[in-house]
Image (cartoon, rainbow, N blue to C red):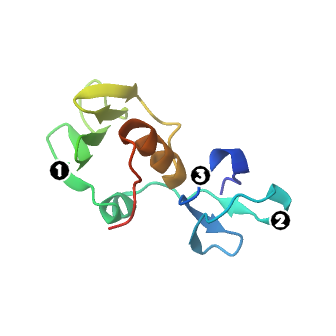
């Protein structure tokens, strides 16, 4: 598990606490007082946020309004990940977004709204 720095977090982000339970960040306090870990992105969590799943011959797609995450599973781009917002590719191969709090932060930056569990 990746230990998170307070600078990576926003109030409302979902994280694992030091006991392994999912918790919502309610305040940012000095790192030495609270240990938080990143929650990995997976299909179940995307669906819990309200993303709709659609599989094509070449990719797995998760869509929420104008925000789409595409995992290429076949073809010359196999293994690549794309993040698309309002039909514009925002990020090619976004492998560095691996945790829910990162996705929540990026979604907020693009849409101005919070990504919350439905």
Estimate the spatial distance between the alpha carbons at disc 3 and disc 2, rounded to whole Å: 17 Å
Q: Residue 82 carries which label?
A: none
Tell me the mark number nearer the camera, choosing from 1 and 3: 3
Instruction: Measure the C-alpha gap from mark 1 to mark 2.
Output: 42 Å
Badge 3 element:
loop
**Relative horizontal placement of residue 37, taking residue 117 as reference (left or right):** right
Residue 14 can be seen in this image: yes
- Whether residue 34 sits left or right of residue 61 in the image: it is right
Residue 10: numbered disc: 3
Q: Residue furthest left?
A: 57
Q: Which of 107 and 38 is in front in this view?
A: 107
| Residue 61 or residue 104, whichever sits in front | 104
Q: In which quarter of the image is the C terminus?
A: bottom left
Q: Which residue is drawn at 50% across and 41% down?
A: 97
- Residue 6 in percent (x, y) is at 71, 51
Query: Can residue 5 be seen here?
Result: no
Residue identifier under label 1:
54
Mark 1 Cα within 10 Å, few/some/many (few <14, many 20+)? few
Badge 2 is on which residue?
33
- Front of the two marks 1 and 2: 2
* Picture coordinates of residue 101, whole percent (x, y): 53, 52
Is residue 95 depicted above or below 102 in this figure?
A: above
């Amino acid at each position: 598990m990746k230990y998170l720095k307070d600078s990576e977090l926003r109030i409302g982000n979902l994280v694992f606490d030091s006991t392994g339970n999912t918790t919502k960040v309610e305040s940012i306090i000095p790192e030495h007082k609270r240990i938080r870990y990143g929650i990995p992105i997976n299909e179940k969590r995307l669906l819990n946020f309200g993303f709709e799943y659609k599989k094509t011959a070449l990719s797995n797609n998760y869509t929420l309004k104008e925000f789409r995450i595409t995992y290429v599973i076949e073809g010359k781009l196999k293994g690549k990940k794309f993040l698309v917002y309002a039909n514009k590719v925002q990020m090619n191969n976004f492998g560095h977004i691996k945790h829910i709090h990162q996705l929540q932060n990026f979604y907020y930056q693009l849409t101005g709204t919070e990504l919350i569990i439905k």
